[in-house]
Image (cartoon, rainbow, N blue to C red):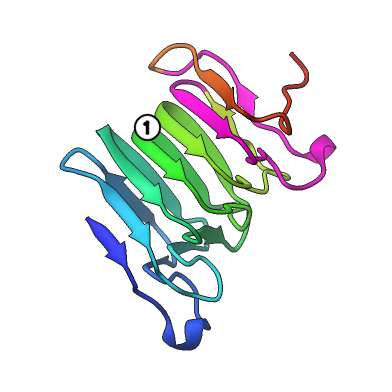
Amino acid sequence: VIFKDNGIVNGLGKGGAIYVSAGTLNLDTTDGDIIFEGNNASVGNAIYVENGATINFKGTDNEITFDGDQTIASDNSLNKLNVAGGNVNFESDMSDFNGQYTQTSGTVTVANNFMNTQGTDNRITGGTFILTEGAKLAPTNDSENSIHVNGNGSSGKPTIRFEKNSQSRLTDL
């Protein structure tokens, strides 16, 4: 599935390809790749969620890719982004998503700013989380942002990997 060149007139609205005002959006890669490219909005070029909405990424080895400026944005920290399978590639700046992030399996690759994790409960309990060159886990104040990593997920111990990335660091080990 390709979400390409969708948008809001003059780019002044929210969610260029998908707008979730409440409830749950499931993106499943079991039947193939999902790609977001060239979508346009004032906030959340790819997806915008609000009012405590949830996005679930799940599936097999296929990929969900957010190309270039394709972002996910949210209105508050009550929104949730869950990864439970598949390969999710964030090639865009995800710092406009300020909700809760949870990963229990799958592979997530971050190639730019990830998200503002301030004041939320973020957990990686399984799968692989990769920060590539230039990626930052939390682009705000380090003392107020965290992702909890532990091996209590269904897929065993999580893996955190830095690829050519000298900017990020692990603390409180």
Q: Amino acid at mark 1?
A: Ala
- The quarter holding residue 6 reads bottom left
The vertical placement of 69 against 85, above or below, is: below
Name the residue located 56 percent from the left edge and 60 percent from the top edge: 74
Question: Which quarter of the image is occupied by the N terminus?
Answer: bottom left
| Residue lying furthest left | 31
- Give the residue number, with chain letter if any, for mark 1: 84
The magenta segment: 125-153
How far across and down, in percent of the image, does residue 140 sit? 77, 47
In the picture, measured across the screen, residue 30 lies left or right of residue 87, that is: left
In the picture, measured across the screen, residue 127 lies left or right of residue 150, that is: left
- The quarter holding residue 169 reads top right
Q: Dot 1: what SS?
A: strand
Foreground residue, 78 or 72? Answer: 72
Name the residue located 46 percent from the left edge and 24 percent from the top edge: 128
In the picture, measured across the screen, residue 169 lies left or right of residue 143, that is: left
Label 1 crowding class (10 Å Cα cut-off): few <14, some 14-19, many 20+? many
Is residue 33 part of the magenta span, yes or no? Answer: no
Name the residue located 52 percent from the left edge and 56 percent from the top edge: 52
How far across and down, in percent of the image, does residue 30 sit? 19, 38
Name the residue located 73 percent from the left edge and 33 percent from the top edge: 167
The vertical placement of 125 against 99, above or below, is: above
The vertical placement of 110 against 15, above or below, is: above
| Residue lying furthest front | 164
Is residue 140 part of the magenta span, yes or no? Answer: yes
Question: Which quarter of the image is occupied by the C terminus?
Answer: top right
Count of numbered badges drawn on the protein: 1
How far across and down, in percent of the image, does residue 34 sit? 28, 50
How far across and down, in percent of the image, does residue 44 sit? 51, 65
User: Taken as a whole, is the magenta stretch helix, strand or loop?
Assistant: loop
